[in-house]
Amino acid sequence: MVKISPVRTTCPYCGTGCGLLVTPDGQGGIASLRGDPDHPANHGLLCGKGMALAETLSMDGRLKQPLIHGRQSSWEEALQQVADGFLSTVQKYGAEAVAFYVSGQLLTEDYYLANKLLKGFLGSANIDSNSRLCMASAVVGHKRAFGADFVPCSYRDLEEADLTVIVGSNTAWCHPVLLRRIRMARQKGAHKRLVVIDPRRTATAEEADLHLPLRAGSDLSLWLGLLHDLQRHQALNQEYLQQHVAVDPEAFALAAAHAGTLAQVAEQCGLSEESIAAFYALFRATPRTVTLFSQGINQSEQGSDQVSAIINVHLATGRLGQPGMGPFSLTGQPNAMGGREVGALATHLTAHLEIERSEDRRLLAEYWQTTRLPKAPGRKAVDLFQDLADGVIKAIWIMGTNPLVSLPNPELAQKGLQRCPLVVISDPVAHTDSSRFAHIQLPAQTWGEKEGTVSNSERCISRQRAFLPPYGDARADWQIIQEVAQRMGFADSFCYTGPAEIFREYAQLTALENHGQRLLDLTALADLAEEEYAQMSPCTWPANESLHPHHSLPRWPLPEGRARLWAVAPRPRSPQADGKYPFLLNTGRVRDHWHTLTRTGVSPRLSKHSSAPFVEIHPQDASQLAIHSGQLLRVANQQGSMLAKARISEGQRRGHLFLPMHWSHSFASQGKCNHLLSSWHDPVSGQPGFKFAYAEVTPVTEYWQGMLLTRQPLQWHNGPFYWSRQALEGSLWMYGLIGLEPLASWSEQSRHWLQPLCKEQESSWIDFVDSGRQHYGCALLQEGALLATLHIGETLPDPQRCSALFAERELSAQQRLALFSGGSAVLVAESRTICACSGVTEEQIRKAVASDPSLSVAQIGATLKAGSFCGSCQGEIKQILAQSQGRRCA
Ligand code: SF4
């Protein structure tokens, strides 16, 4: 037997960028997968999502070959049409009429070529990444303070810090391995403190020594208050300020004017004076402090200023550039940082060259041998889709992203795609909310099939390596871009033999005429041979002869090498409060899902923690509105509405709601939270305010409930019933159904719904009606085997029992009867899986603590194995123990 060696690669999910050792099984799957002990990001650790990657390689739903207006085409025809379409649009309407919308899922080499083609050869700066939606405000904050988009920290700082302040990040769920590193460091150093600033009592907050559940949108007041407090207590580091910082004289005055007294800050933030004073005192007293921030800070209309306010307190106290110190921005996507490096943002050129600096344009134009570089920034994501809707942009190429789910105001984005004469989408997935509007679809390779590099939150460049053959005719993104460029007549500039050659060109550019002016310097990687690129180990930039130890800082590319303390003040917010919509709405991620569910949504294990869209609401708010757990609710505001099931949680602030961001029209009807979000965005960074909207919530009348199990997903859209689907073991899909109208004829309607599943060969139906129990059931069979089964009624059968019958090649008479009898369970009362690694449910944990009320998180780990692997669920276990034991968490 041939022994297959493990392949070193990088996780395709969050910006932690964990290294993996993957052993393929030789049949298109994974035989084993574990964390890479030698990778500096994770040292062998993985979270539940990373560990379940083998379950997400399903080829169902993949795009197999190019499509033109929905018909299968050859690559040649599709590539030629893309090239002709873009060229003719530029000739007719000018370069501003074309755009690329790219993704943090692309590899750095893909990004580099996309940017080179659009900016360098088509002459348009309209290339923006969906990373604009998660970290553009951090980029602005870095450039203001340091003169470059430079993250001045590493993960080791998280372990070396005596105080970690996590703000606007549910790290336990969104970057679980990082929280685990913090947790492990705290277990070794009892003095280490953790402060979490978040309106919600998240799993991260459960682990904190101090949780500040501030009012949504009040972060700037809190951080201006801290700067003012530091000044009042003479806790500024005057020596550091004099030597290393250029201070805008307005900065302290504005902080004093807007923060005011502690009582005023408390009032603005909706917190007690005591809790704010405790945080400020802890910050003053702890030199080794890291402030870790993410989407909760960035995704705001004042995101750039919030980032600056955080960096300001670190500059004012000299808390950066030494072990365990610094303002640390976490990136959301696996290669958001790579896009920033190679200029896949409308506001930058590649390799940290500036679009508005003529010397930088000259350097790049000479290097790329082009005369077409644009002189001004292009349209940022939200504005770009506005231009599509206004008919200004007439050709767009969307690569590896689903903007109709991820952008705010998806109606506007849809209008844009409908109006645009040429929409090209290259993606591994065939059917997405956005692909419905594509004229040309190009099948792209996905994780495990493609080769290149990614950069994580701490500027560490790692290889993603292929270990699977490409699916169908799928090609690498860089290859697709190159072939289009060649057909446009740019073959001399797009003739790479592979990603290694692209990487070399990019690395050489970072070194070109650099002289220490650009911190992004990859001189040490500029001449990598093919084999060296193949073997490349993770490497943090700057990568040049003066390689920096992890915590030392370079000389800033600003006058006299000084960082800048940037004056900021709160601005009036929009949208404004409106009595009609009394709740403040927050949106974000859940623990076991990723983006729009195209990958994690196919994993039964990952779907058990959160199986359908939900809206989290405080118990007292729920009680006032007579809302009970699991009830279907309509969340609405002037922008739009969506449906979600009630999840009542004491972790929610009163008057606040939380909605997950993941569900698209492919996984739930009316489950997209972005319908409630307007296009309002930060005027500097262009980042939308995903964390702040007003909304109302009302119960929906539920006329009936049902459950559908099927081998194949249905292409359902909105109708007279609500549905959401979830992957089950055995390659099945379970749909939860709730009637929004009475059902006239159960049998007729059910057959109508299931008809698309009927194969050409003869299918047979079984119907079952129990008028006494008000229960209807039907099953669709083919040659005696189950294709689908549907139940409608007050109580529904146990899905596990029903799904087991799908394994039968031919149902016996007894099994047919068993489909519709006995073992009923109410679907909405299904117990959530808390520990995805060990498959332990909330009910099991509650039972354990009921029999022994003194159980601790560690003892639950020892007895049930819950929380003892990746540890992502420890915060939730703590919460369940506290509730069951009738006490608040510490
Ligand atoms: Fe992947 Fe992020 Fe989990 Fe690491 S922490 S395994 S990068 S999802």
Image (cartoon, rainbow, N blue to C red):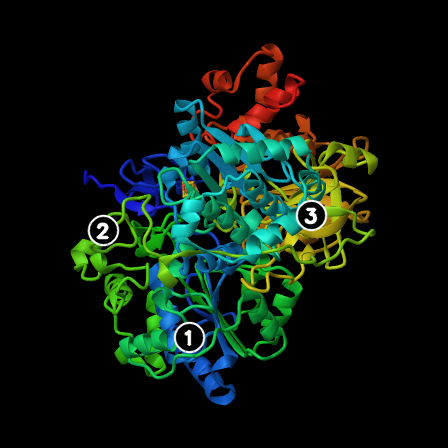
Q: State which quadrant residue 779 falls in.
A: top right
Q: In which quarter of the image is the N terminus?
A: top left
Q: Which of marks 1 and 2 is in front?
A: 2
Q: Residues within 10 Å of mark 1 (few under 14, many from 20)?
A: many
Q: Nearer the viewer, mark 1 or mark 3?
A: 3
Q: Which of marks 2 and 3 is nearer the N terminus?
A: 2
Amino acid at dot 2: Met
**Residue 532, position as x, y percentages in the image:** 18, 54
The residue that appears at 66% across and 50% down in the rendered structure is 258
Mark 1 vs 2, N-terminal side: 1
Asked whether the viewer can see residue 511, the reply is yes
Instruction: Say which residue label 3 marks.
Output: 585
Relative to 394, say whether 783 is above or below: above
- On residue 536, the disc is 2
- Residue 178 percent location from the top left of the image: 43, 38
The one nearer the camera, 695 or 640, is: 695
Give the Cα distance between marks 2 and 3.
44 Å
SS for dot 1: helix
Find out whether the residues at labels 1 and 3 contact each other: C-beta distance under 8 Å.
no
Quarter of the image where the C terminus is located: top right
Earlier sequence position, callout 1 versus callout 3: 1
Q: Residue 771 carries which label?
A: none
Quick check: marks 1 and 2 in contact, CB under 8 Å?
no
Q: Distance between the residues labelled 1 and 2?
A: 35 Å
Q: What residue type is labelled 3?
A: Leu
The response on whether ligand 1 sits within 8 Å of label 2 is: no
The residue that mark 1 highlights is 78
Viewer-nearest residue: 799 or 268: 268
Mark 3, secondary structure of its residue: strand
Cα distance, mark 1 to mark 3?
43 Å
Question: On the image, which quarter does residue 843 sit in?
Answer: top right
